[in-house]
Image (cartoon, grey):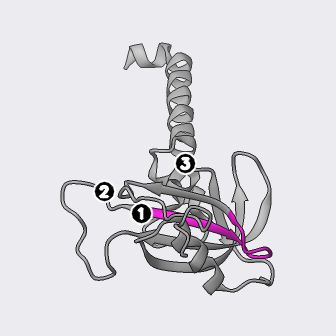
């Protein structure tokens, strides 16, 4: 105890530095459960996509703050043309924030999966999934991201289809 009484200040400084470092890790490190919780506060959750998953592709989805001029059916058609053969899992009207480039827009977010709604998760690997963001004003594709999607051959455009005589 004599040693501790002589070295109270250095021991206190070391403990304060360790506590500060630990607190910073808990709040800012992406692996921390508290950090993941804080990043997800105020966001909209999509089927199969966590707030962290979306954050890694520069997407933050928040509750919608406007009225769309296009319909959800239009967004579904855009998603089906972007990822043919996929199943539409969920469609939400959201406020889309591009966290890498900035900007906020009203959008339809469409979650796509290549396994059926009642199919069990594939064993040995992650479930193939995609997210499609469609502008709620113009109905145009704004952004999309797919992970582990099966290879699909693009459908021919009308100019490439054989002409009938």
Q: Which residues are magenta?
A: 129-141
* Marker disc for residue 148: none
User: Where is the C terminus found, in terms of image quarters?
Assistant: bottom right
Q: Is residue 64 visible?
A: yes
Q: Position of residue 61 (x, y in %)?
A: 64, 66
Which quadrant, please, contains the N terminus?
top left
Q: Secondary structure at mark 2?
A: loop
Report whether residue 45 is seen.
no
Are the residues at dot 1 and dot 2 in contact (C-beta closer than 8 Å)?
Answer: yes
Closer to the camera, 165 or 124?
A: 165
Do tag 1 and tag 3 residues touch (Cβ < 8 Å)?
no
Q: Main secondary structure of the magenta part?
A: strand
The residue depicted at 80 percent of the width and 56 percent of the height is 103
- The answer to which of 85 and 45 lies nearer the viewer is 85
Earlier sequence position, callout 3 versus callout 2:
3
Whole-percent x, y for residue 91 in the image: 56, 80
Q: Residue at x 52, y 63 (%)?
A: 156
Q: Which residue is mark 3?
A: 56
Q: Is residue 1 left or right of residue 143?
A: left
What percent of the width, then of the height, locates residue 132?
A: 57, 66
Q: What residue would you read off at disc 2?
A: 126
Res 129 label: 1
Taking the magenta stretch, the answer to whether it contains residue 140 is yes
């Amino acid at each position: 105890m004599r040693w501790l009484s002589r070295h109270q200040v250095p021991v206190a400084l070391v403990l304060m530095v360790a506590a500060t470092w630990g607190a910073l890790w808990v709040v800012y490190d992406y692996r921390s459960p508290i950090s993941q919780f804080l990043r997800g506060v105020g966001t909209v959750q999509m089927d199969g996509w966590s707030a962290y998953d979306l954050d890694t592709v520069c997407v933050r989805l928040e509750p919608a703050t406007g009225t769309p001029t296009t319909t959800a059916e239009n967004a579904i058609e855009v998603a089906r043309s972007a990822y043919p053969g996929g199943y539409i899992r969920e469609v939400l009207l959201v406020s889309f924030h591009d966290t890498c480039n900035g900007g906020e827009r009203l959008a339809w977010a469409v979650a796509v999966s290549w396994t059926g709604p009642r199919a069990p998760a594939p064993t040995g690997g992650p479930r193939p999934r995609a997210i499609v963001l469609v502008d709620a004003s113009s109905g145009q594709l704004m952004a999309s991201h797919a992970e582990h999607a099966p290879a699909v051959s693009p459908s021919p455009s009308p100019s490439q289809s054989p002409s009938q005589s």
